[in-house]
Amino acid sequence: MNRARYDGQVRFFRRRPLITDENYGRLMTSFGRTVDADPLVAEPAKALVQRVERELSAEIAAADAKLYQGAAAYHLRLLAGAWILAKEGVIPLETAEVFEEAVGWRFRSRALPERLGKLARGEFERDLLMDEN
């Protein structure tokens, strides 16, 4: 992970985020309504989360333990929806980037939102073999 340094501390974010519980709640409410309203966004978002759940199950369990059961899947589904909306030009790309940082802030871990973001943006090596599961 490429981490910048400032004030002698490791920095997890590209810029110093102004994320608070109130701001995070607003993001969640806004994207919850938007993502859930459109099945063409909601279904691909679910599929992305399912892939992350298979790949990073220990991190999912840790995030759920910090918040509540199912929290990781819910938050990541909304983040996936944000990336899908950004790719379609519905919202600015920077909005999805900030939301990714916010999810990392909430989970106190960058692994889950970064992996989901890479999948949503298509920044991964494709496995062209059919999964038998």
Image (cartoon, rainbow, N blue to C red):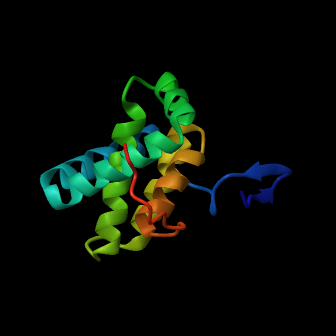
Q: Residue at x 18, y 49 (%)?
A: 36
Q: Write the residue at 54% across / 40% down.
A: 56
Is residue 18 in view from this perspective? Answer: no
Q: Is residue 126 visible?
A: yes
From what the image shows, is residue 79 above or below residue 122?
above
Left or right: residue 100 versus residue 75 is right
Residue nearer the viewer, 100 or 51: 51
Q: Quadrant of the C terminus?
A: top left
Name the residue at the right extreme. Answer: 8
Q: Residue at x 37, y 53 (%)?
A: 48
Considering only vertical position in the picture, is 10 above or below 61?
below
Q: Nearer the viewer, residue 83 or 27?
A: 83
In percent of width and height, residue 5 lies at: 80, 58
Q: What x and y, as percent, mark residue 10?
A: 78, 50
Q: Is residue 54 left or right of residue 80?
A: right
Is 109 situated left or right of 55 in this image? right
Residue 64 sits above or below residue 72 on the image: above
Image quarter where the N terminus lies is bottom right
How many marks the image carries: the answer is: 0
Taking the view exactly as shown, the residue that stands out farthest to the bottom is 89
Q: Is residue 75 above or below residue 127?
A: above
Q: Position of residue 109 (x, y in %)?
A: 60, 42
